[in-house]
Image: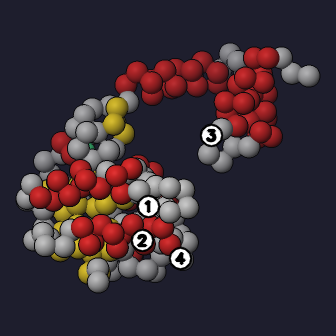
Amino acid sequence: MASQEIETLAGALARLPGLGPRSARRAVLWLIKRRESALPQLLAALAGVQDRLVECGTCGNVDTTDPCSICADQRRDARALCVVEDVADLWALDRARLFAGRYHVLGGRLSALEGVRPEDLTIGLLIARVAAGGIDEVVLAMNATLEGQTTAHYIAERLEGYPVRITQLAHGLPVGGELDYLDEGTLAQALRARRPVG
Ligand SMILES: [Zn+2]
């Protein structure tokens, strides 16, 4: 029977995406064996995340500044806005500098099953950004899942009547594909071949 400390840490780690109870225990053991080397690094990194990272009030990205470095970067094309479900998708697109514009993070996708409604996402903020003007193109970069596509259609409808071109990623994307898991070549291809919604 493991000590309370180990159980507590394993329990906390097991809640992380991709980690079940079994791999969480293995991670705890790994850390205990390296309490002089790896553990201090991990603690410092966690403290850094808690102390310094904030959510960008404009786009929803996570960074050390608000507005984030992408929103504040004047070299980026302010006329192009790429809408993604999660911060991980933004990072996937931005890792390889695939998109030269700015982003908008929805914070999820519409889901009748999980009870996620439009007001649970940052769709209102997105409409306000478009309504404020200065944006020519909105790229809907939702995942190629049923819920992702439902979300894209809903947003396209809400943006009807605004003077913006609405495009979405080409579906060389595998069905059910999540952006975060795609290689950069596939992602670049989907972005290059983006097409008007409708
Ligand atoms: Zn931002």
The kind of secondary structure element at disc 2 is helix
Q: Residue at x 55, y 61 (%)?
A: 113
Position of residue 141 in the picture relative to residue 182 (left or right): left
In space, the residues marked 3 and 2 are separated at their CA atoms by: 27 Å
Residue lying furthest bottom: 198
Q: CA distance from mark 3 to mark 1?
A: 22 Å
Q: Residue at 41% of width from left, 56% of height from top?
A: 117
Give the residue displayed 9% in from the left and 54% down from the top.
132
Q: Which of the two residues, 196 or 156, is positioned nearer the viewer here?
A: 156
In this rendering, which labeled residue sits more in front, label 2 or label 4? 2
Mark pair 4, 3: CA separation? 26 Å
Please give the residue where the numbered disc 1 appears in the rendered image: 110
Mark 4, other Cα within 10 Å: few <14 / some 14–19 / many ≥20: few
Q: Give the alpha-carbon distance from disc 2 to disc 1, as whole Å.
A: 7 Å
Q: Which residue is mark 2?
A: 150
Q: Which mark is residue 16?
A: 3
For the residue labelled by badge 1, is the local secondary structure a helix, a strand or a loop? loop
Q: Are marks 2 and 4 in contact (CB under 8 Å)?
A: no
On the image, numbered disc 4 is attached to which residue? Answer: 174
Residue 85 in picture, x, y percent from top left: 41, 57
Which of the marked residues, 2 or 4, is nearer the chain's N terminus? 2
Residue 12: image quadrant is top right
Q: Nearer the viewer, mark 3 or mark 2?
A: 2
Contact flag, marks 3 and 1 (Cβ < 8 Å): no
* Viewer-nearest residue: 80 or 120: 120
Q: Is residue 179 visible?
A: no
Q: Nearer the viewer, mark 3 or mark 1?
A: 1
Residue 10 percent location from the top left of the image: 74, 29
